[in-house]
Amino acid sequence: MKKIYALCVLFLALACKKDNDETPLLSSEKNILSFTFTVEGTTYSSTISNTTITAQLPEDTNLTSLTPTITFSKGATVTPNSGVAQDFSKEVSYTVTAEDKSTKIYKVLVTTEKTPQPNEPIEIGHVPNEYTTNKAGGEVVYFDVNTLPVKKEQIKVELVKRRPPFDVYPLKVQKIDKKERRVYVVLPDSYKNGEYYFKATFDKEEVESGVFTLDSGEIVLNVLDVIRFEPVTSLATTELQTFKTVVYANTEALKKYTYYLRKGTHDYQLTVSDISNYNLEFKMFNTPSGAFSGGNDFKFVVKGGAKEQVLPFVNSEKQPITIEPVRTPIIKALSKTTLKAGDELTVTGEYFAYTGMNFDRNYRFCTLLLMQGNEVKATLYPSFKTPTEAAFKVENEVPAGKYKVVLSSQIQLKSEPFSQEITIQKTTATSSTRLKVTKAEVIDENATFFRKQVMITFNETIDSARIEAIVFPKLRIENTIRYPKDISSHTLSDNEYNYLVNNLPKGYVIIKENGKEYQAEFSLVKGN
């Protein structure tokens, strides 16, 4: 019995010892699963064949300090570790150790691709708008070249403003792509919108790109010189006054912004009458009610987007533009009150004309209206005008009689009738002994040629005769186009055309010839 008991104890002891000696099996997996490099933001994979890893990176990549990203078998370790920079200009070995301490050695071979380059002078290609527009400071843009024979370290690039001030920004060359022949650069953190070009040096070879636009930085305003290419110096406060600008800003935002002229704490909104690319035409605001002194201390304000932007309101010479408040004209005196055809009447007063408004025929002349009751009987046009004085010639078509005079200013504001009346005495006009009008037509607005124009045909060739104007009771047309026996007007405005075609008024042509001035009268007809 004792023997049997001992055997049982021994069996139990051996069983317990077997259970306590069981341990987990260790993995022998020791494979590199992926081996990648990230160069200038682009990830490049490697080829793994048995224990050889090969990779090809872009030309000019610095192989002496590359940091790989390695994935490997679960539970294993790798030496050198993933994320540790190595010199891959030569073969590099990596040892993978499994859980069971077995090892596998991989060899890594890295090369760079070689892209043949044409042997020719370097040129920068056209820089398309999609490369550069809507690019904020700090963003990457690029340009293409016809050949790229140098390393990135041999390239220097500057961003140069096309117009004064010629701002120059040194740019960081982020990367190059020799295969695509493309140079990537980083825009400055802040820049002013406008037209620019790249100035690049490739080792010792310097080249420039064509002009392109940057439009996502600080907004820039250029007031265009519209008065015979002379800088704008003044603008009048009337919606008849327009001015053209170039506003360099995000093209999508241009239509959403609102625009103002600011004086002190007051903002006066401008109306956009036309917009094309970066070219904007504005209508001025009418003279505000209350105290408004104008001046040259206004700012141009752009509202909308992330912030309000306040810009200097200056011309191309960087001179402040004067805002001139317009007023209703006032007549203070007449040079005479009795006149006949050919006489000149000088009117003095205030607010007749405005110096900044001589370039648009909509408000080119102040005029003198001869009134009987509430009806305009005749309109006199100035031979001379200043803001305080204008001279008017009495033409033959003015009927004899007594008239109240009202001055319509350059911006079509009318004075009160002057207290004194004038008397016009009728005289007979001197007829021409040579040029006579044989046909006078207002051409239909739907005609193929010369539509909405006045055509005058004479009996003889015009030769050296000078055509001063085509005159109607309520319209005077200057700056005519000459032909051998004809003259034509400009294309009439809708108001001018409707006046002529609906009334067919009589008129005359003022002609100067051989030191004498005469008139050739006509009756207007409709032309096809």
Image (cartoon, rainbow, N blue to C red):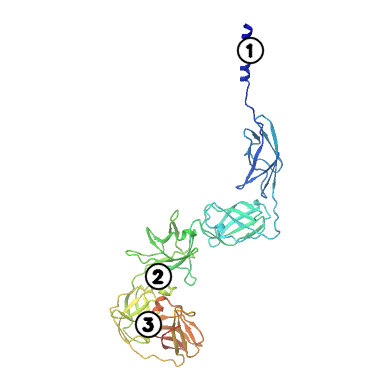
**Residue 282 left/right relative to 8:** left
Q: Is residue 158 above or below residue 437?
A: above
Earlier along the polypeptide chain: callout 3 or callout 2?
2
Q: Nearer the viewer, residue 106 or 151?
A: 106
Label 1 crowd bin: few (<14), some (14–19), many (20+), radius 10 Å: few
Residue 240: mark in rendering: 2
Q: Which residue is mark 3?
A: 503
Q: Position of residue 322 (x, y in %)?
A: 41, 66
Label 3 crowd bin: few (<14), some (14–19), many (20+), radius 10 Å: few
Q: Amino acid at mark 3?
A: Asn
**Residue 112 left/right relative to 359:** right
Q: CA distance from mark 3 to mark 2?
A: 26 Å
Mark yes or no: residue 346 visible. yes
Earlier along the polypeptide chain: callout 1 or callout 3?
1
Front: mark 1 or 3: 1
Question: Residue pushed farthest top?
Answer: 2
Q: Nearer the viewer, residue 508 or 190?
A: 508
Q: Nearer the viewer, residue 447 or 359?
A: 447
Residue that appears at 42% across and 70% down = 356
Q: Which residue is mark 1?
A: 10
Q: CA distance from mark 1 to mark 3?
A: 138 Å
Q: Amino acid at mark 2?
A: Leu
Image quadrant containing the N terminus: top right
Q: Position of residue 122 (x, y in %)?
A: 66, 59
Q: Amino acid at mark 1?
A: Leu
Q: CA distance from mark 1 to mark 2?
A: 119 Å
Q: Position of residue 331 (x, y in %)?
A: 32, 76
